[in-house]
Image (cartoon, coloured by chain):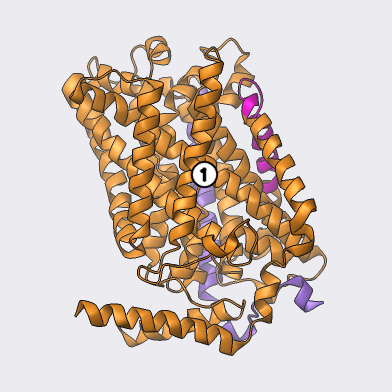
Chain colours: A purple, B orange
């Protein structure tokens, strides 16, 4: 039983890692330089 | 140099200039080098190996199956949160700079110092691990007896070597880091193959890896398991190095962000495979935990004397590379903080060697501070030899808490700035998590609070005392001087474009002269 739970935990960690990679990759591919603004600080902005 | 690279370098330089900083460091690292520096600092062959005995003692074999995966699951979320920040604010100050501009200079100042304390712990912990493994191996070769003192001497020599290599240039360090990443993978592969085919008595069934309920400590299993998590949690530290070397990385908004995340992800995979095989080769867990070094014991029992010794030399070299990268990361962090005058004698630590374009003084300060921390513990143990904890557990607990609290500060401040509407969608860099960002940030913070408590409960309470003492010292420094005088990174924004360009031209002139001389 604990072996199954352990393997499921390993699998979950792998799935989370892959899901974050896919999500981040979407962000990189769809990035629009024109809409981006460098964040140079809250003090400067206020 | 290709046209594309030249264009990218110019774009990266302009990006840095927007934050008020000149391109002083040599920007020459590619994506793999950026990944390699964090992968080398995480170094599955350092943390997981040197604290193998700690994990086995407290959590039994199940620590390697459950503990490693559990910690990795949450660390992936912390790393993803930091990758987003690195992509949004790509400066070498990283944690310090993120905190300062997401909130204010005082948050930044405290984040920097807490990060610095963690960095001292990590460099000291890694190089002390090198000494712990190298000294018994050297003593067998040269015929002397390994003692606490000889370990301290080896530790000092290793630190000096790391200081020297870092001093003479990022190119050589980057190449060694690239080599280190492949070297780690190769050593893990050799370990796996060796243990699969040559383990005396064969491997245990897979159930052994997930066997819980057995602890060799006198604590209840649940508590012992939590204490044992130090093994995995310490291994997964130092990946902020990809952010600290961001001003030396080409196209950093994407590459450094990936460097942070992938270094953790790949370390999880390779680390798990390695730990699984090492643990499945155990036939005498009680003997292992009662030996001086559980990992050496397990490998020697499984593979025999000579072959075991060769593997241990290979592991020791991997640790050496890990220490080399950690000095790079630590020195960049101090350089970035010093150029904003956040430390005593900042004008020295913020200086860049015109010859090598490395923060030479910050590198040597990193070496001295790391040696001082281990020396402090050596002196304490000399006067109180019956202490329960090990030097390594002390150093690693200091680094885990220092680093993770420092990681948590900008993540919290980003959430706060977002809720105030100061940090907006348009400020995210290309590497971002979209709608997943907030929940991932929140879970990361909960994990950081949890492990910061776990890491300093007895028997590791001395780490808590050391951290508390350092924090009190910080508060005294803050109220006595820095509260009024520290201007933070906002001061850099006051610098004119001409001033930044003049500074950059000076470095470029020096670089040209160097190349002229070498031709």
Instruction: State the residue in front, B310 or B469.
Output: B469
The reply to whether the magenta stretch includes residue B280 is no
Q: Percent x, y for residue B45?
A: 36, 38
Q: Percent x, y for residue B332?
A: 50, 60
Residue under the image location 47 percent in, 63 percent down: B245
The 10 Å Cα crowd at callout 1, few under 14, some 14 to 19, many 20 or more, is: some
Q: Percent x, y for residue B19?
A: 62, 76
Quick one: quadrant of the C terminus of chain B? bottom left
Image mark 1: chain: B
Q: Which residues are magenta?
A: B444-462
Residue A24 vs residue B208: left or right? right
Q: Residue furthest left?
A: B306
Residue under the image location 69 percent in, 35 percent down: B469
Residue A15 appears in the picture as rendered: yes
Secondary structure under the numbered disc 1 in the rendered image:
helix
Residue B120 vs residue B36: left or right? right
């Amino acid at each position: 039983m604990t072996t199954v739970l352990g393997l499921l935990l390993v699998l979950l960690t792998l799935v989370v890692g892959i899901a974050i990679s896919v999500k981040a990759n979407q962000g990189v591919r769809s990035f629009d330089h024109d809409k981006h603004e460098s964040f140079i600080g809250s003090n400067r902005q206020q | 140099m290709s046209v594309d690279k030249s264009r990218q370098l110019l774009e990266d330089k302009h990006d840095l200039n927007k934050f008020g900083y000149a391109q002083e460091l040599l920007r020459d690292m590619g994506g793999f080098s950026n990944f390699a520096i964090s992968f080398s600092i995480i170094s599955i062959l350092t943390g997981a190996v040197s604290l193998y005995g700690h994990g086995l003692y407290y959590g039994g074999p199940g620590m390697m199956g459950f503990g490693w995966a559990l910690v990795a699951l949450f660390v992936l979320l912390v790393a993803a949160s930091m990758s987003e920040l690195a992509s949004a604010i790509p400066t070498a100050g990283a944690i310090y700079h993120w905190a300062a501009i997401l909130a204010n200079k005082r948050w930044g100042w405290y984040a920097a110092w807490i990060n610095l304390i963690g960095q001292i712990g990590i460099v000291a912990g890694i190089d002390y691990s090198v000494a712990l493994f190298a000294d018994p191996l050297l003593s067998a070769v040269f015929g002397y007896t390994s003692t606490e003192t000889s370990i301290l001497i080896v530790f000092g020599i290793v630190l000096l070597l790391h200081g020297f290599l870092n001093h003479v240039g990022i190119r050589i360090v980057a190449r060694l880091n690239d080599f280190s990443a492949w070297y780690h993978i190769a050593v893990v592969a050799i370990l796996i193959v060796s243990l699969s085919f040559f383990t005396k008595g064969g491997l245990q069934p897979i159930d052994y890896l997930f066997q819980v309920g057995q602890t060799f400590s006198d604590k209840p299993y649940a508590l012992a398991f939590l204490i044992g998590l130090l093994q995995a949690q310490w291994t997964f530290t130092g990946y902020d190095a990809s952010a600290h070397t961001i001003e030396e990385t080409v196209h950093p908004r994407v590459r450094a962000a990936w460097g942070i995340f992938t270094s953790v992800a790949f370390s999880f995979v390779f680390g798990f495979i390695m730990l699984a095989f090492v643990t499945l080769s155990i036939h005498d867990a009680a003997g292992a935990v009662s030996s001086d070094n559980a990992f050496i014991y397990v490998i020697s029992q499984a593979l025999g004397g000579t072959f075991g010794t060769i593997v241990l030399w290979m592991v020791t070299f991997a640790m050496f590379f890990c220490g080399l990268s950690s000095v790079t990361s630590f020195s960049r962090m101090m350089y970035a903080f010093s150029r904003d005058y956040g430390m005593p004698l900042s004008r020295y630590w913020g200086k860049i060697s015109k010859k090598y374009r490395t923060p030479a003084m910050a590198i040597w300060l990193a070496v001295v501070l790391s040696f001082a921390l281990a020396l402090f513990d050596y002196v304490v143990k000399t006067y109180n030899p019956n202490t329960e904890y090990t030097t390594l557990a002390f150093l690693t607990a200091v680094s885990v808490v220092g680093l993770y609290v420092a990681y948590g500060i900008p993540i919290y401040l980003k959430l706060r700035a977002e809720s105030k509407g100061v940090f907006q969608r348009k400020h995210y860099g290309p590497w971002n998590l979209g709608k997943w960002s907030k929940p991932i940030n929140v879970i990361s913070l909960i994990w950081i609070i949890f492990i910061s408590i776990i890491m300093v409960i007895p028997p590791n309470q001395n780490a808590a005392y050391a951290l508390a003492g350092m924090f009190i010292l910080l508060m005294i420094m803050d109220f006595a001087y820095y509260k009024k005088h520290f201007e933070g990174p906002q001061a850099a924004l006051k610098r004119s474009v001409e001033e930044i360009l003049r500074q950059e031209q000076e470095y470029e002139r020096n670089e040209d002269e160097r190349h002229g001389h070498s031709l």
